[in-house]
Image (cartoon, helix red, strand yellow):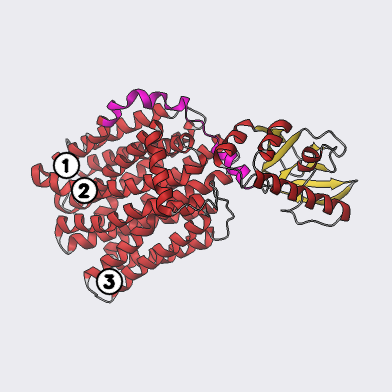
Amino acid sequence: MRVVVAYAVFILTEYAMWIGVLVFAYAHGGVTAAGMASLAQLVPAALAAPLFATVADRRSPTVLLTAGYVAQGLGCMVVAVAIYADASPFVVYAGAVFASTVVPTTRPAQAALVPGLARDLDELTAVNVLVGWVESIAIVAAGAGGGLLMAWDGVAPVAAASAVLLAGAALLVGSLPASALGTTDDGEGAFHQVADGVSAMLSNQRAGVLVGLLGLEYVVIGALDVLFVVLAIDVLGHGEGWAGYLNSAYGAGGVAVGGFAALIIGRRLGPIVVVSAVLLSLALAGTALVSGDLAVLLLLTLVGASRALFDVASRSLLQRAVSADMVARIFGLTEGLSMAGLAVGSLLVPALVGLGGDRLALLGVAAIVPLVIAFRLRLLLRIDDQAKVPVVEISLLRSTPVFRDLPAPTLEGVARALQRADYPPGAVIIGQGDEGNRYYAIADGTVEIQQDGQRLGELGRGSGMGEIALLHDVVRTASAVAVTPVTVYTLDRASFLTAVNGHAPTSRAASAVARELRRRDADRAESDPRDADSG
């Protein structure tokens, strides 16, 4: 929940600052200045995103997420101080560029972190739906709150409030534990890792088309960001605050579709990607054919609704479709393309407005996504059949002491062999003296370890059970009893021994765990809850 709340703060500040900086630039140089301000913020972000993602993929997504929130807050503070001090507009832009450059730390880090908190693929999809719904609510709040603050005292209070909120987001996620989905000591440099991510994306048709569609989604969003300002001031004849209100209408659509989005859990996502993309484009094209405040607000609400559904379905499907050790890198490339898409959309609007006015701009942007959908329709409709990478199970295994160093391809094979089991409170998961034929990885809940009727400790998510009996071919040396409802993933003896014995570092790690547990058994010492285990 802390990740979701912090993400809501991130979206709130990201959109409020984006609108605020565009309004500031528009006031200092019109639509051209707004477009150039967008470009200045987005190009560094697009270049930095894939490099940031390697930290989440190979090190710690928690560190990247926390540092990103802190850095974004510092950039917002620079903007606020510069405006209050009546400094040069270029100082304001410098602070905004710094903040936007580190924005791409958030989504790749979160994409790597969330699978480690879910119990299965349906729960992962449910979390993505919740995140998408929260994002839509935050967009509404950003538009409404930003509009009110700008109507009161301009852009400076928006930046100051964003800095404070981002500091709170950093505190929320700073203490979260997380293991990277990839290995950590392979000696690869960041650029080499990015190149591997590009190669993986190009060799995977499913990933390539989804990343491309997400990039095009942000071309549309980038165009809308500028069009909100143009529509508010030049077309509808309202003040600066209306740029925020139009953005709120767009965000309100995402909130409205949130309940429906929950229905995608456990369903095929390819057709949902196609339908939502078409609805988005039709609604956007419709804004070129109507006039009046209410009609524009309603159509932008539909645009926001279909965009939110498209985004959740596409990202969930992409998370299923790529190898687990490439998750953060692929999402880093997606984030980079998204930032580039925002820049293209921001530059596209002034060009299209100059050629044929607002209507041509709207129709031109609306036509982009359907063209790609039509070209790759068959693949999109069949994409679910092959997108079954067990990312949740891989993340769980990576968090256990035994399997954390196993190479990614082998780890994915082990993850596919896991079987889920659920136990009510009081159930005996492992009985002392029983034959040892399975390994257990705890995905959720609390398990108490008992030996000869004596309590030795408790285990939670990320802990493993059963190493001693499997490695030494003995009966279970302790019992494991569910304290709360417990979800575990089990691995049969043959698969466990094949994985452990086939990789020297993993074999050493498993043997070390077993030796330590047998020593504790002998000493009958009270163990730490995270270190206790059962044979």
In the rendering, which numbered label is found on residue 178? none
* Residue ID at (44%, 56%): 9
State which region is magenta: 372-399
Q: Which mark is residue 83?
A: 3
Secondary structure under the numbered disc 2 in the rendered image: helix
- Disc 1 marks which amino acid? Ala
Q: Nearer the viewer, residue 415 or 94?
A: 415
* Residue 388 is inside the magenta segment: yes
Q: Secondary structure at mark 3?
A: helix
Mark 3 residue type: Ile
Residue at 24% x, 75% y is 86
Q: Position of residue 148 (x, y in %)?
A: 31, 60
**Number of residues whose C-alpha sits closer than 10 Å to that of mark 3, classed few (under 14), some (14–19) or many (20 or more):** some
Report the residue marked by disc 2. 227
Q: Amino acid at mark 2?
A: Leu
Tell which circle, 1 or 3, labels the residue nearer the N-terminal end.
3
Total marks shown come to 3
Residue beneath disc 1 = 361
Measured along the vertical axis of the image, is residue 402 above or below residue 373? below
